[in-house]
Amino acid sequence: MMYHAESFAKDGFETTIAGYKGTSPTPSLLTAPGIGFQYLSAPPKLPGKLFVILAPVKVAVQVLSLMYALIVVGRPPEFILVQNPPSIPTLAIVQLASWLRGSQLIIDWHNLGYSILALKLGQRHFLVRIAKWFERTFGRTAYAHLFVTNAMKERLEKDWDLQGQKIVLHDRPPARFHRASATEAHELFLRIPPFVPDLSSNFAPPIHPPRSTIRTAVTSGTAPPLGDAFSGSASPVATFRPDRPALLISSTSWTEDEDFGILIQALKQYEMEARTRSKSEQRSLPRLLMVVTGKGPLRDSYMRQVLGMERSEKWEWVRCRSMWVEAADYPLLLGAADLGVSLHSSSSALDLPMKVVDMFGCGLPVCALDFACLDELVQDGQNGRVFKSADELAKQIMDLLSGFPDSTQELNRLRSHFETTHGPRTSPPANREWLSWEENWNAVIKPIL
């Protein structure tokens, strides 16, 4: 939604973002003219055992906070844009607000809220049936409906008979997402040193900040004081170290719709195979640093599991760490990685993982868990690989990283896909398959505004 708000502002609209406090917005959003923030009251957190009983209390808090923000505060807006999910009570409130204030309602369908609730309660639960009715009833009519996939548009057109303009707006990253240079990566790794403080010396190469990080080293110029950005005429030139570990990135919300256990088992297989190859004449595998970004309820339990395996099984070739990355650093981290991993399975089988969109924007090939409409984004063997099990994921990682860093023909071939389909930013959009967020917005959404 941050990208949508920024695009509205660039098109000359005075834009207010109504949402909960939490993660810092992107720097470009904070500095964009014409953007304000209306913070909602945070709903109470519900204990798992009391979820069904206390859910109405949570909904009541959300209703009052959202009604105040949309109906009481400020001038009547020309457009109200809402992202779904969450559906309850949001869809009903925005319908009321748009009617009372004479606003045009745009619903951005990113997923189906009832399908996410079904992961917790089961498809047959009475609350899931109520949620589905609510979402269909209050989401049916709008000035415009935006969809992240063709599959979602076709499904909701047929099953829910949506009324209003229906437009597919595939997610795309903004133009600032790009492949990071070695110097950009060096600066990033100095700013979040050293990624993981407990990497043992037999895994990580020697690190001497600010001249070297786990992945980069300064080869010319004068290195700045630790933590300083590279700027000015004396900026050093960094290169990627030949003894660096391969860097894999995954981003997750640590919820039930992503099975992190698949990744843990794949990493275990990689560790076993790397040990075997190190004692034979087979093509070697590099040490592997798996970084998982994001926050969520299942993070601690999964990380305890993988860290316990590292210690008990004495892993030598693999490390897996979780970290939180600010919005300004996230695209740089993706751009500095070697391979992305997506465990998104989609509760509705109708949405696409935004993490993969961001990775592609940075020219990063992805291994993605297969589901119904994934082929609208990931084409197996062209811009990434598609897997259905831990065994397949482990094999794909090993195939792509074999011979790293100098002889990774298959990984290089996948990466070259982005150079040909993205094209130079200066070339006309008609000559490129992959448009930036701004180009996509101007072509698809601007005409209806």
Image (cartoon, grey):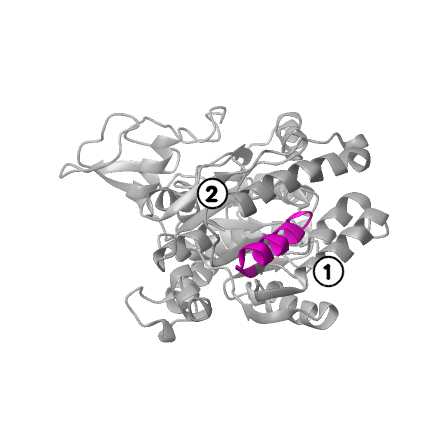
What stretch of residues is rendered in magenta? 87-106
Residue 100 part of the magenta-drawn span? yes
Q: Position of residue 347 (x, y in %)?
A: 70, 53
The residue depicted at 51 percent of the width and 44 percent of the height is 18
What is the secondary structure assignment of the residue under circle 2?
Answer: strand
The residue depicted at 40 percent of the width and 62 percent of the height is 436
Q: What is the quadrant of the C terminus in the image? A: bottom left
Numbered circle sitting on residue 247: 2
Task: Bin the neighbour count of mark 1 within 10 Å (Cα to Cα): few under 14, some 14-19, many 20 and up.
Answer: some
The residue depicted at 38 percent of the width and 65 percent of the height is 439
Q: CA distance from mark 2 to mark 1?
A: 46 Å
Comparing 350 with 221, the one in front is 350
Outermost residue to the bottom: 430
Q: Position of residue 270 (x, y in %)?
A: 60, 43
Task: Give the amino acid at mark 2.
Answer: Leu
Task: Give the amino acid at mark 1.
Answer: Thr
Q: Is residue 121 left or right of residue 259?
A: right
The residue depicted at 70 percent of the width and 38 percent of the height is 60
- Vertical placement of residue 226 versus 317, above or below: above
What is the secondary structure assignment of the residue under circle 1?
Answer: helix
Q: Position of residue 145 (x, y in %)?
A: 58, 65
Q: Is residue 81 left or right of residue 416?
A: right
Q: Quadrant of residue 7?
A: bottom left
Q: Give the mark nearest the N terminus, 2 or 1.
A: 1
Q: Quadrant of residue 162?
A: bottom right
Q: Position of residue 144 (x, y in %)?
A: 56, 66
Residue topped by disc 1: 137
Q: Is residue 336 visible?
A: no
